[in-house]
Amino acid sequence: MKTHLYFNLMERLFGYLVKGNIPHQSESSAPAPTSEKKRTVNVNRANEVRPRGESRDSAGFDDDDGWVTVAVSVLRIVACFLSMMVTTFVWAVIMVLLLPWPYERIKQGNLYGHVTGRMLMWILGNPIKLEGMEFSNTRGIYICNHASPLDVFLVMWLIPTGTVGIAKKEIIWYPLFGQLYVLANHLRIDRSNPAAAIKSIKEISRVLVKKELSLIIFPEGTRSKSGRLLPFKKGFVHIALQSKLPIVPMVFTGTHLAWKKNSLRVRPAPLTVKFLPPIKTDDWVEDRVSEYVEMVHNIYVENLPESQKPLISEGTEIAKKTNL
């Protein structure tokens, strides 16, 4: 009972950051939709007046590679890192205090993500548009394309409370963040051992059903270097088959332009996160796994811009390594 009250207090304390307005946030100038079936939220909208010296990038945003802009970008990244270290340390202490209550630690891990993810996106300052938010509280298996570190920040911010992540077992060695991941009772899988991975998938499915949890997973299994969609691994379909949970696609656009791999330059590219309607899986059968994977992959292809649609040559090379 005390733990429950503690969690409610923490939710209220940080609610202004998780659900309320954040500094420099402005509403869309377009009229609000009359239907509740589709809600669109604009966050961190870019200033319409372009500063002198900047030019409009071919992708549709103002960009400037001058040393001042690059220096500001580096400072933003450093601020993100320091802020994340502070919140990670604070929540690590909370997790240790909650060791006897493993599923309260999951909720606290989600609260950490809501606060930290939103704070990091505010620091970076990219204009963000959220679509399909009416689907964002569905209990299910959330999947998303992965092309940038920003994807992780967005997932942390937007997934519902009661969601666990699944990552490679080596994540435990990431300083501080990896230990918090384990303390938050999230899941790990040994991708180098197919037999162990299959066993882990069965256990994950059992936990999701028994504890009424949701799951977040990157179905590509790795980050796309080009920003183009890669082939999907089959693990998320196997979990859906065993848990009968719906699949909720999250489509990220623009993140690969905003922060490229191995770069210290965060560009002001506009980002869009679109939650698609849940895909029911309660009538799926084992002998059509590949068909389901292809179907979900095609849904992403239909909802991504041309610059993020997959290339056949790139997909073929990765597909050879695709098993689970």
Image (cartoon, rainbow, N blue to C red):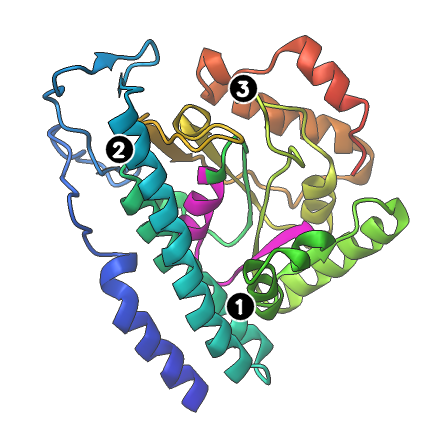
- Determine which quarter of the picture holds residue 229: top right
Image coordinates for residue 249, horizontal then vertical, percent:
51, 37
Magenta residue check for 284:
no
- The one of 173 and 13 positioned closer to us in this rendering: 173
Dot in front, 2 or 1:
2
Name the amino acid, label 1. Answer: Ile
Q: Which residue is mark 2?
A: 127
Quadrant location, the N terminus: bottom left
Q: CA distance from mark 2 to mark 3?
A: 23 Å
Quadrant location, the C terminus: top right
Query: Which residues make up the magenta segment?
Result: 150-168
Q: How many marks?
A: 3
Q: Earlier in the sequence, mark 2 or mark 1?
A: 1
Residue 106 is labelled as 1
Q: Earlier in the sequence, mark 3 or mark 1?
A: 1
Image coordinates for residue 187, horizontal then vertical, percent:
66, 59
As helix, strand or loop, the secondary structure at mark 2 comes to loop
- The one of 68 and 199 positioned closer to us in this rendering: 68
- The one of 159 and 61 positioned closer to us in this rendering: 61
Dot in front, 2 or 3:
2
Image coordinates for residue 9, horizontal then vertical, percent:
31, 79
Magenta residue check for 166:
yes
As helix, strand or loop, the secondary structure at mark 3 comes to helix
The residue furthest right is 195
- Determine which quarter of the picture holds residue 31: top left
The answer to whether one can see residue 1 in this image is: no
Q: Which residue is mark 3?
A: 301
Q: Is residue 206 left or right of residue 29?
A: right
Query: Measured along the vertical axis of the image, is residue 155 above or below residue 293?
Result: below
Q: Is residue 275 left or right of residue 42?
A: right
Query: Measured along the vertical axis of the image, is residue 290 above or below residue 244?
Result: above
Please tell me which residue is depicted at 46% across the width and 26% down the height of the picture: 256
